[in-house]
């Protein structure tokens, strides 16, 4: 088959982007032709993919997105299947990495926001997917109700996929050696705790909550903690927050990195108190490596942490004091060894790796 994959921007450290690349590789492995249409590509080009760079002008992101679609619409007509990884018109299949924008706008924004050009554009692109005949690859069942409520999308158009973390996230046989090496390289003493946060989009992932949680720890515990943040985003506002809280020297921004699995092994706790999160692949990646997790129940994949008994899942609505106490409790808990063992065992038994294969099954099934 001749496939067109469309996304606004590729960079190697985004969750959506990594999912896109795994699905593209699986498609190539099955002998399909994959052409990628994007406004920007950062990082190396994947062998086998034909990448069409389509720069789009505009003073805002939504204006550039609109012009991008206009520029590629006629080119997409020659493909057997058009797969989108962002919401946009003209798709045969949409990979639903994002939550329902209209539901979020009604829950978190006022009337004036819903009169803005940005809101109107994003709603139009969302409606172009969910009020059309586009098939939807769903990552979390909890999002389906919102899409059906706002767009009356037929349930049979949703296809639920299992998670699809990379297998290199599983703890290797020399995990303990990697842990010792990484902690030595980072200057983490044996009695110190390495708290890890991974994900692009610091605000959405709840970094402000993490900083307040660290500042609230008892002094004797706080002095033993260091927080490492991996992800592509501007840290300036959070550096200011850390300075005001008196913890700036304990916060380390590392940017996007390719050696994230080593940090999972080196860390003592993954913090992910997200404000909203369709899935939360990082939760499963941490679990596969044996790293205990503290997260919020808004994450689609938080249920796996509960099922595995691999950490704490905080219930909504979020309570900062509860989070602060949970950080302290988890660091000092005698259950840490059990959480690690439970996590590794669950990751070996559960289907948390096959998303790319199932996604391409759905793409191929469209033409049957």
Image: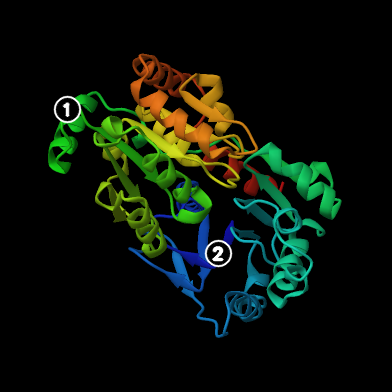
- Which structural element holds mark 1? loop
Image coloring type: rainbow
In this view, the residue in front, 175 or 18, is: 175
| Mark in front: 1 vs 2 | 1
Q: Is residue 351 above or below residue 15?
A: above
Is residue 153 visible to the viewer in this orientation of the structure? Answer: no
**Which residue is pictured at 74% across the width and 43% down the height?**
144
- On the image, the x and y values in percent for residue 64 come to 58, 79
- Quarter of the rendering containing residue 75: bottom right
- On the image, the x and y values in percent for residue 81 come to 65, 59
Q: Is residue 203 left or right of residue 99?
A: left
**Which residue is pictured at 26% across the width and 38% down the height?**
262
Residue 319, label in figure:
none
Q: Which residue is mark 1?
A: 190
Q: Is residue 222 above or below residue 309?
A: below
- On the image, the x and y values in percent for residue 208 come to 46, 50
- Quarter of the rendering containing residue 173: top left
Query: Mark 1 or mark 2: which comes first in sequence?
Result: 2
Q: Which residue is mark 2?
A: 7
């Amino acid at each position: 088959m001749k496939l067109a994959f469309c996304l606004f921007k590729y960079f190697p450290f985004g969750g959506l982007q990594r999912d896109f690349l795994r699905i593209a590789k699986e498609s190539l492995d099955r002998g399909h032709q994959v052409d990628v249409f994007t406004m920007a590509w950062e990082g190396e080009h994947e062998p086998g993919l034909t990448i069409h760079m389509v720069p789009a002008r505009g003073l805002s992101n939504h204006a550039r997105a609109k012009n991008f679609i206009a520029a590629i619409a006629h080119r997409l007509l020659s493909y057997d299947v058009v797969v989108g990884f962002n919401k946009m018109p003209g798709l045969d299949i949409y990979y639903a990495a994002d939550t329902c924008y209209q539901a979020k706008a009604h829950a978190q924004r006022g009337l004036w926001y819903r009169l803005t050009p940005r809101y109107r554009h994003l709603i139009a692109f969302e409606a172009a997917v969910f009020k059309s005949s586009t098939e939807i690859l769903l990552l979390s069942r909890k999002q389906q109700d919102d899409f059906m409520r706002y767009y009356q999308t037929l349930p049979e158009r949703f296809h639920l996929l299992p998670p699809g973390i990379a297998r290199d996230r599983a703890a290797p046989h020399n995990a303990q050696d990697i842990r010792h090496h990484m902690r030595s390289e980072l200057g983490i003493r044996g009695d110190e705790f390495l708290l890890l946060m991974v994900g692009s989009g610091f605000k959405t992932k709840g970094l402000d909550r993490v900083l307040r949680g660290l500042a609230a720890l008892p002094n004797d515990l706080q002095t033993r903690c260091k927080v490492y943040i991996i992800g592509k985003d501007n840290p300036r506002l959070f550096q200011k927050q850390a300075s005001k809280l008196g913890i700036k020297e304990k916060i380390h921004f590392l940017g996007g990195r390719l050696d994230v699995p080593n940090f999972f092994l080196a860390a003592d706790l993954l913090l992910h108190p997200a404000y909203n999160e369709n899935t939360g692949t990082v939760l499963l990646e941490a679990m596969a490596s044996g790293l205990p997790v503290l997260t919020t129940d808004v994450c689609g994949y938080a249920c796996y942490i509960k099922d595995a008994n691999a950490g704490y899942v905080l219930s909504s609505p979020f309570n900062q004091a509860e989070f602060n106490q949970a950080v302290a409790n988890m660091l000092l808990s005698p259950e840490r060894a059990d959480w690690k063992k439970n996590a590794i065992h669950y990751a070996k038994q559960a289907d948390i790796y096959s998303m790319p294969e199932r996604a391409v099954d759905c793409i191929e099934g469209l033409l049957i």
